[in-house]
Amino acid sequence: MPEYLAPGVYVEEVSFSAPTIEGVGTTTTAFVGPTLTGPVSGMPYGGLPPNNEPVANSPAPTVPQLLTSFGDFQNIYGGFANLSMTLSSGGAVPSDPARNVNYMALAVQAFFTNGGSELYVSRVFANNPGTGGAVIDPGIATSGTPSNSNVVVAGRFPGAFLNRDTVTVTLTPMKVQNFNNLANLPPGSLLGVAGSGGAAPTLYANGTGSTFVNTSTSAALTAANFPPSQKTPQNLYVLTVQVTAPAANGTEMVFIGLGLDPNNPNYIGNVLGVNPPRPIDQLQNQVWFNIGSTLDTGPALFNALFPNWIDPSISVPAWKANTAYTANQLVTDSNGNIQIVETAGTSGNTAPAWNTTTGQTTTDGTVTWKNLGAAIPSTVFTLGTAGGGTNGNDGAEPGPDDYGTPSVPGKPFYYITSLEDVAIVATPGSSCYAQGEAIMSTALIPHVEQQRAYRVAILEASYGLLDSDYQNVRGQVDSSYGALYVPWVWTPNPLAVAGTSTPANVLVPPTGFMAGIYVRSDDENSVAKAPANEVVLGAVDFERHINFAEQQLLNPLGINCLRYFPDRGYLVWGARTVSSDTSLMYINVRRYLVYLEHSIDNGTQWAVFENNGPALWARVADSIDSFLNSEFANGNLLGTSPSEAYFVRCDRTTMTQNDLDNGRMVCLIGVAVLKPAEFVIFRIGQMTAGAKS
């Protein structure tokens, strides 16, 4: 309380209204399941080596990133290409190819098509056992076996999609025009003069300073020896590299102006390292460079990547038949490579089959030629066994342990538990796995039912099931926090190509469509309305057409049907939960109660540690009353007046002395929620003409 010590007028601001409670969002969604690539929740970037320890300097696992479009998903988790997961028991591929369809990508597309706007994706990756089952297989593609003296390119994330892909490192020499400008180059810059007559290039580095020195003689580079006088017109170049690497979305990522010295701010080992400095690179870079410890200087890394370098300004004549050549003469072959005479002589009548492997020689007539490589050299790394490394893989078919539970650190569900804005959760495609029902009952449902989770689950049954099978799936769970939808949906196949055997349509689970419909219904109406009698956008057909008689059997069990109606299209025709509690049999009722609970929880945090007395009780009651009155005015509560729609009590009738002594303030709230008109009944009878109704 302020002190009033000096006479005068004191003006103070006070609040006469209760703190406002703002309604929380109800549309943010989280999907959990396998993807083509991308970070695996709980697995350090760069994978796990055979000793099951994180790669040195790997970023720590963190929560998934918020996605606002399908393009965002593609840039991190890849496109629609199918997976190649193996069965958990051994290395066999499932006999049913439908189990390796990329359901996550298709579900994300359906989500945004049907009105979804904010999505988190938590990737599931089930490690295959390593050799003999003794070590963990990280599923990472590599271009070779790393050592202290070589460069190996490796995938940052598990996945088979990088196998046989290439990463190209191209030298990008830029001619120095003004010696005085060299002082403006950043630390870690590298200069070079191409070798003449097959000699090694001369390199200059500035290390951490601004003075360039010859890396062989340590002599400083000065204007007096710029450019060096050579018989062949050679020049001084600033040496950087360009890297072309595969991107998650199927295109290429190009990185330009990368340095070869660790002191360079754009050092290739940082920008394309296991832990890039930019968070966006940590998510989207698909490869990283494992640079040997002896290649820790610019010249060492340059020589490892480009053992031969020809001055790009040299104009080299083409090979000629029956021509006398002297030692060290240069010609270009039909492949654009530069060849140098090792043994003088006379060329033959026809052009020889030039060697394309750097450093090898060939004989033409009596001339022996050595291949020096292209004027602008490049090094290509091929990932997988095709390049001498290891193949990446998509792991084994996941089970409930791979999805995890909220209490198991390092598992996908653990990393979305802390995302307080998530209101809808689904596991697209999990129902088709061997342990699909266990994933639903032991991972998904426990996740949404945990205290203060404030979210619901969209459930699915597998494809190819009959009504009795749907009933068996429904019998696995009893929860008001989940809603089950059947059957699966036919949607256009993004992988289809005209004239090929790839089918035009693909069968996908309804979860992605329903999650988007939940969002669309909330946006157009409110969370209090049932997300039913809504059009399924993107559907070209349903797996099976459930009729009225079948739905009479399924609906009372809490199995929501997607149905086709002539002249109306493909519609959601159910809004029940998988709960035996009849007071919570509708999904909109459960979602609306979750919305109220979460909003009141967030909006009354100010009351914690306030003095627990009548003044606090009155402010809390007024705050909640104002919030519920707004909900009533918006038509979200049942009743003709606020007193019929809700009540709020927070006084001595709701708290005992024991509650007060233990620091508890108890507020009792009752609401009359709206339930959907699931059965619209018109009673029609005959009447006598002129009779009064």
Image: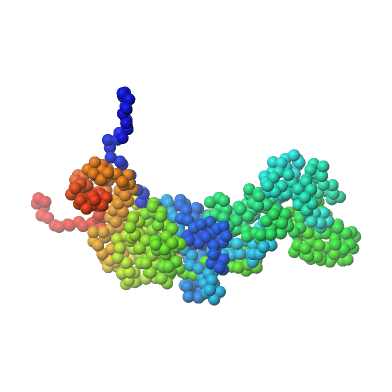
Across and down, in percent, residue 464 comes to 39, 70
Tell me where residue 445 sits by quadrant: bottom left
> In this rendering, would 133 be left or right of 367?
left
Residue at (66, 50) in percent of width and height? 263
- Is any atom of residue 213 visible in this view? yes
Across and down, in percent, residue 26 comes to 35, 51
Q: Nearer the viewer, residue 627 or 336?
A: 627
Residue lying furthest top? 8
Give the colour scheme of this rendering. Answer: rainbow
> In this rendering, would 667 be left or right of 108?
left
From what the image shows, is residue 180 above or below residue 308? above
Across and down, in percent, residue 431 comes to 40, 67
Q: Nearer the viewer, residue 361 or 575?
A: 361
Quick one: quadrant of the N terminus?
top left
Residue at (63, 49) in percent of width and height? 266
Q: How many marks?
A: 0
Across and down, in percent, residue 339 comes to 81, 59
- Is any atom of residue 312 visible in this view? no
Residue at (33, 48) in percent of width and height? 602
Tell me where residue 434 sits by quadrant: bottom left
Residue at (48, 75) in percent of width and height? 89
Residue lying furthest front? 5
> In this rendering, would 110 be left or right of 572?
right
> In this rendering, would 582 be left or right of 209?
left
From what the image shows, is residue 246 above or below residue 186? below
